[in-house]
Image (spheres, helix red, strand yellow):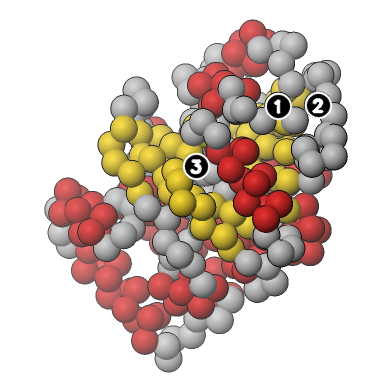
């Protein structure tokens, strides 16, 4: 579909945000409006829909005339959709936002200003509000100050919603690994962190939406296993203490009631069980 192009000017870079989507018609309009209502007007929004059969296409049709380009066709999953969008993106600054999450006001401007102040290409990220299906705030999840070693060993990660990165980062480390179904963002940020700084913003950047369609214990287990494999890919080994700590923590936690799991993870500065180990709503 055609879109009205936003043209960059000196000091005002174009920001491209990819929105992968599949049957999130209940939420996608709120997602897109959270981007459109940012106080940064030099935006390119690329919706890559995997062939939704719900009201998604009707919603996109209602937004005709907004700076949104969209396609709807079958794909091979979220990583494939992200890569399709990123290959088309023209921005100097890149990001993606899942079609049921929200950008908080001022998120784009905060990211642009932080990247402009960085000594070179970088990734920026911030805290996360966790909301329910009706948009009610459940709690705020502080983002950790990260090092690559802590990400590999402890399984800590960049809070993906509201994160942005310089185009040079993308060009250096490449696209998302389409062989990964759940931990592709963890792998991408680990590759980025090997060459570029990760900058934590002192503010909440986005809202992560938890709802019934996003919670499956079977997928949670697969997510955990893939995240551990990604850490192994980047240097975690069975003779490292954190390898066994993570396995013991995961298994021990699963023996506790779900509410206790969530409480302990939150006290440890981690999202609750669903947020920690649930895939990002695309098959």
In this rendering, does residue 23 appear at all?
no
Residue contact at pointers 1 and 2, CB within 8 angstroms: yes
The answer to whether 137 is drawn above or below residue 142 in the figure is: above
Q: Earlier in the sequence, mark 3 or mark 1?
A: 1
Q: Quadrant of residue 129?
A: top left
What label does residue 67 carry, if any?
none
Residue 6: image tag: 2
Q: Which residue is mark 1?
A: 41
Q: Which residue lies under the disc numbered 3?
A: 205
Image side of residue 105 versus residue 86, left or right: left
- Quadrant that contains the N terminus: top right
Disc 2 to disc 3, C-alpha distance:
22 Å
Q: Is residue 240 left or right of residue 66?
A: left
Residue at 72% x, 23% y: name it. 68
Q: Residue furthest bottom?
A: 239
Q: Secondary structure at mark 3?
A: strand
Measured as percent of width and height from the top left, residue 162 is found at 54, 43
- The residue shown at (33%, 44%) is 140
Give me the C-alpha separation between circle 1 and circle 2. Answer: 7 Å
The answer to whether residue 108 is left or right of residue 261 is: right
Residue 255 in the image, given as x and y percentages of width and height: 17, 62
Quarter of the figure that contains the C terminus? top right
């Amino acid at each position: 579909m055609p879109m009205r192009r936003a043209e960059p000017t000196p000091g005002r870079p174009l920001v491209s945000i990819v929105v992968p989507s599949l049957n999130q018609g209940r939420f996608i309009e709120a997602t897109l409006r959270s981007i459109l209502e940012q106080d940064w007007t030099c935006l390119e929004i690329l919706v890559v829909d995997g062939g939704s059969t719900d009201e998604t296409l009707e919603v996109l049709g209602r937004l005709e005339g907004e700076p949104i380009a969209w396609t709807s066709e079958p794909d091979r999953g979220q990583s494939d959709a992200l890569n399709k969008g990123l290959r088309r993106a023209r921005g100097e600054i890149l990001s993606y936002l899942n079609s049921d999450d929200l950008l908080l006001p001022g998120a784009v401007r905060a990211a642009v200003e932080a990247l402009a102040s960085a000594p070179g290409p970088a990734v920026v990220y911030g805290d996360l509000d966790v909301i329910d299906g009706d948009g009610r705030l459940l709690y705020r999840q502080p983002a950790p100050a990260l090092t690559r070693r802590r990400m590999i060993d402890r399984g800590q990660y960049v809070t993906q919603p509201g994160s942005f990165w310089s185009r040079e980062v993308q060009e250096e480390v490449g696209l998302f690994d389409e062989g990964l179904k759940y931990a592709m963002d963890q792998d991408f940020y680990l590759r980025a962190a090997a060459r570029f700084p990760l900058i934590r913003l002192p503010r909440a950047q986005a809202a992560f939406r938890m709802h019934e369609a996003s919670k499956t214990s079977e997928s949670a287990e697969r997510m955990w296993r893939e995240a551990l494999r990604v850490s192994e890919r980047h240097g975690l080994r069975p003779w490292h203490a954190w390898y066994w700590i993570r396995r013991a923590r995961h298994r021990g936690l699963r023996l506790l009631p779900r509410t206790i799991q969530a409480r302990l993870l939150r006290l440890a500065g981690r999202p609750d069980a669903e947020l920690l180990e649930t895939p990002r709503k695309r098959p």
